[in-house]
Amino acid sequence: MAEVTFGGSAEEVSLEEVGLRYEVDGKIATITLDRPEKRNAQTFATWSALARIGDSLPQQVRVVVIRGEGPSFSAGIDLRMFTPEGVPGQGSFAASALLDGATFEQRLARAQQGFLWLRRPDIVSVAAVQGHAIGAGFQLALACDLRVLADDAKLCMKEPALGLVPDLTGTKPLVDLVGLSRAIEICLTARTVGAEEAARIGLAELVVAPGELGQAVEDLTAALLAVDRDAATATKRLLQGASGRTLEEQCVAEGREQAVRLRALFT
Ligand code: ACO
């Protein structure tokens, strides 16, 4: 298993400094939030580093696993952002409030890039969640295609309780998964959703005992890798586009993808 690091230019700090570990083992990339003593709290540097991982993901990688070290998947954004001093080198919410609209949007767009690449059709992303996934932690889990939860998982969209909105790409997958009414209820009460409920309402594909989380993700990964890559990519693309198309349009899209598959397989 190759441990991958990024050279540190002024703005591109090392993954270790950011609190991330990134390993590529053949077709599987594993990203570990690795600041357990701070419950894997995230910063802009975390998201920028995630974006860089996405930008340079080796072509052979088919499954990306995101996991957290320690008792919590992630306690969300680093609470130092709420202080006047902020996170050293990364500013604070008070400083962000003074940015002009375009600069703020640009900065946020880069942060969101850290999440968006996990939807690429040529990969399947899997979040392995134990303990708390709060705010940005919940949104990171939502950014993945699949979620495997330990039965002690606790999901909470805490942003509205702190006067903020969830802005790290989480609102759309949440609505897609649980429907508008349930998403409103979960976000606007900022309540905690436990693992059993998460599975029941579509937020988790699988719930296992905490000690079985690693094995469950390995088994799922093996099953995903057993399917032909090009067929998997085309099928994910079809499924991702389904909600934006009519049934008739989806049938046409199926035909187009299948024609490509048939040509690849039989000519
Ligand atoms: N940012 C920075 N540090 C954090 C964060 C965080 N989000 N969460 C926990 N820590 C730190 C604590 O300050 C503590 O540090 P210390 O040992 O130096 O005092 C350490 O991590 C352990 O935290 P505990 O609270 O002792 O851990 P516990 O397991 O009892 O509780 C829990 C975990 C429930 C996650 C709790 O830490 C918590 O509520 N954290 C804040 C969650 C939050 O409000 N996140 C922001 C959401 S909004 C968003 O993400 C945009």
Image: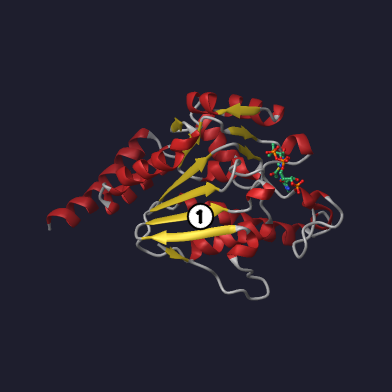
Q: Quadrant of residue 154?
A: top right
Question: Who's the residue at 54% across and 59% down the image?
Answer: 21
Q: Residues within 10 Å of mark 1 (few under 14, many from 20)?
A: some
Does residue 12 appear in this view? yes
Given the image, on which type of amino acid does mark 1 rest? Ile
Please name the residue shown 66% across and 61% down the image. Answer: 45
SS for dot 1: strand
x%, y% of residue 16? 60, 63
- Splitting the image into four quadrants, where does ligand 1 fall? top right
Say which of 151 and 47 sits in front.
Answer: 151
Left of 60 or right of it: where is 54?
right
x, y percentage for residue 73?
Answer: 58, 43
Q: Which residue is mark 1?
A: 31
**Number of marks present in the image shown:** 1
Rendered position, 151 above or below 256: above
Query: In the rendering, at what x and y percent does residue 178 appear?
Result: 53, 29
* Quadrant of residue 238 within the rendered picture: top left
Q: Depth check: 33 or 94 in front?
A: 33
Which residue is pictured at 73% across the width and 60% down the height? Answer: 102
Residue that sits furthest to the right in the current view: 84
Q: In the rendered image, which quarter contains the C terminus? A: bottom left
